[in-house]
Image (cartoon, rainbow, N blue to C red):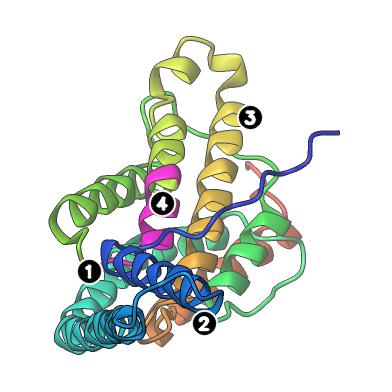
């Protein structure tokens, strides 16, 4: 079994300078202590330590200033990214409403609960040959928007979110480019589409778990769309219970 490697901390150039200054001070102190140094050696020790403390304090001040300067911009960018995700979230909710479980369940407002509801119910789907599901389309649009945010706002987006967005964007583009695949084999069309949709929804969940760590405000499904989803799913379930209309 392969053991994970030890991740060493990454030091900034300023911290490296401080470490060198401390090392110089330690060496000079040892040399002076054993009696093999000139009288000016203590001054060198004090000077080296002063440099180490000064550069460390200055770097901390610069970082705090940079964080204070970019914090409003970062919040704005993260809110826009959340708004981009909202389109995919609405599509997941409405797609569930068209193919709900056997028992009616009110549509929740919390995105992770919406996703869990969809994953628990989605098993089959019947599609016309010439129709690409809205969920597939919204997944591709969200992947494109993530890429635009990364190019435009990379300097203020948290690194963990950039890494996750890049990975999820690639996954979404993979599973939202299946049109030709399922058109070539109509017999497997529905199962292929559902598989692709499940990958899109699972990827949305993976991305959301990371985004929630940095989001200034939580993404929620609005009451309007919850009401629409509830009415649609109630109608679908009622139609199932009544059965298909009889032909006269």
In the depicted structure, whether residue 4 falls above or below residue 60 = above
Q: CA distance from mark 3 to mark 1?
A: 40 Å
For this orientation, the residue located farthest to the top is: 184
Task: Report x, y in % for residue 127.
Answer: 50, 34
241 to the left or right of 50: right
Please state which of the two labelled residues, at mark 4 or mark 3, is closer to the viewer. Answer: 4
The residue under label 1 is 156
The residue under label 4 is 163
Sequence-earlier tag: 3 or 2: 2
Q: CA distance from mark 3 to mark 2?
A: 28 Å
Q: Secondary structure at mark 4?
A: helix
The residue under label 2 is 109
Q: Secondary structure at mark 3?
A: helix
Sequence-earlier tag: 1 or 4: 1
Q: Are marks 3 and 1 in contact (CB under 8 Å)?
A: no
Q: Residue at x 47, y 10 (%)?
A: 184
Count of residue discs: 4
Task: Report x, y in % for residue 193.
Answer: 54, 33
Task: Report x, y in % for residue 85.
Answer: 35, 64
Q: CA distance from mark 1 to mark 4?
A: 13 Å
Q: Is residue 126 visible?
A: no
The residue under label 3 is 191
Q: Which mark is residue 173?
A: none
Q: Quadrant of residue 50?
A: bottom left
Magenta highlight range: 156-167
Q: Is residue 231 magenta?
A: no
121 to the left or right of 63: right
Sequence-earlier tag: 2 or 1: 2
Sequence-earlier tag: 4 or 2: 2
Q: CA distance from mark 4 to mark 2?
A: 27 Å
């Amino acid at each position: 079994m392969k053991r994970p490697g030890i991740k060493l901390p990454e030091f900034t150039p300023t911290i490296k300078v401080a470490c060198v200054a401390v090392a110089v001070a330690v060496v000079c102190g040892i040399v002076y202590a054993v009696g093999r140094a000139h009288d000016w050696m203590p001054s060198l020790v004090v000077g080296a330590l002063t440099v180490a403390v000064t550069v460390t304090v200055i770097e901390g001040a610069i970082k705090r200033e940079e964080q204070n300067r970019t914090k409003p911009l970062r919040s704005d960018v993260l809110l826009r990214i959340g708004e981009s995700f909202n389109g995919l979230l609405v599509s997941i909710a409405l797609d569930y409403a068209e193919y709900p479980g056997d028992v009616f369940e009110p549509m929740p407002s919390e995105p992770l609960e919406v996703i869990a509801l969809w994953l628990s119910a989605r098993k089959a789907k019947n599609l016309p040959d010439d129709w690409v599901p809205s969920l597939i389309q919204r997944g591709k649009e969200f992947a494109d928007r993530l890429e635009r945010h990364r190019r435009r706002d990379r300097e203020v987006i948290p690194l963990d979110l950039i890494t996750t967005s890049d990975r999820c964007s690639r996954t979404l583009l993979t599973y939202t480019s299946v049109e030709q695949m399922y058109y070539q084999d109509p017999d497997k069309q529905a199962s292929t589409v559902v598989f692709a949709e499940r990958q899109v929804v699972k990827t949305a969940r993976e991305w959301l778990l990371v985004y929630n760590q940095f989001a200034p405000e939580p993404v929620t499904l609005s009451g309007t769309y919850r009401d629409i989803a509830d009415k649609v799913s109630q109608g679908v379930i009622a139609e199932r219970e009544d059965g298909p209309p009889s032909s006269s």
